[in-house]
Amino acid sequence: MLFSAATTAVDGRVWRTLGTARTDDLSDAWTVDPHPLLPLTEQIENSSLYFEESTGTWFLFTNHIAELAPEMSAPHGYSREYTDAIWVYWAPDLSSFTPANKAIVVDTTVAEWSPLVVGLPSVLRIGERLAVYYDGSSKVSISHGRRDVGVAWLDLPLRVPEGATQD
């Protein structure tokens, strides 16, 4: 199974989401699922998965794409879009993620060293914690270059937020 970002242009705006492709043989053709994992309106890309065995829950960590405030200018050659946060979705299986089951994991209020951008998540279990690696910039810039890597730590086992559903 492969997860990949997909984009489409609607009314002059680029919309992003994640799609799934499957194969039984890595040397053979892949079949792309007919529907995305989540709606285009979620504006997400660049994801990393974690499975919490104790609860049977999949956690999908992903970039959220935002648009610069009107008073801010984008660098020459850049769109006004940038990665502003790491979101997490949860579901009991890889085909049932929903916008109702999501939370913000890292944004600029958590990663205070990066005043504008937070993105490109990757997760890795280290002992009894989950490391959430992400990129950011100490400058007020949406440039994709000259970024640094940050890490946030989540205690394991991961649980869905209190009051949230797991399905």
Image (cartoon, helix red, strand yellow):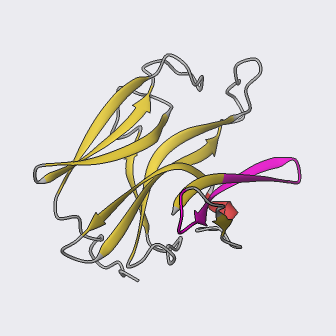
Percent x, y of residue 61: 42, 54
Q: Name the residue at the right extreme.
A: 11
Question: Does 2 appear above or below 84?
Answer: below
Which of the 4 image quarters holds residue 107? top left
Which of the 4 image quarters holds residue 31? bottom right
In-image side of 102 versus 162 (left or right) = right
Which of the 4 image quarters holds residue 141? top right
In-image side of 22 versus 79 (left or right) = left
Residue 12 on the magenta segment:
yes
In-image side of 55 versus 84 (left or right) = left
Residue at the image position 16 percent from the left and 60 percent from the top: 156
Q: Which residues are magenta?
A: 6-26
Residue 20 on the magenta segment:
yes
Q: Viewer-proximal residue, 114 or 77?
A: 77
Q: Viewer-proximal residue, 49 or 71?
A: 49
Residue at the image position 76 percent from the left and 17 percent from the top: 76
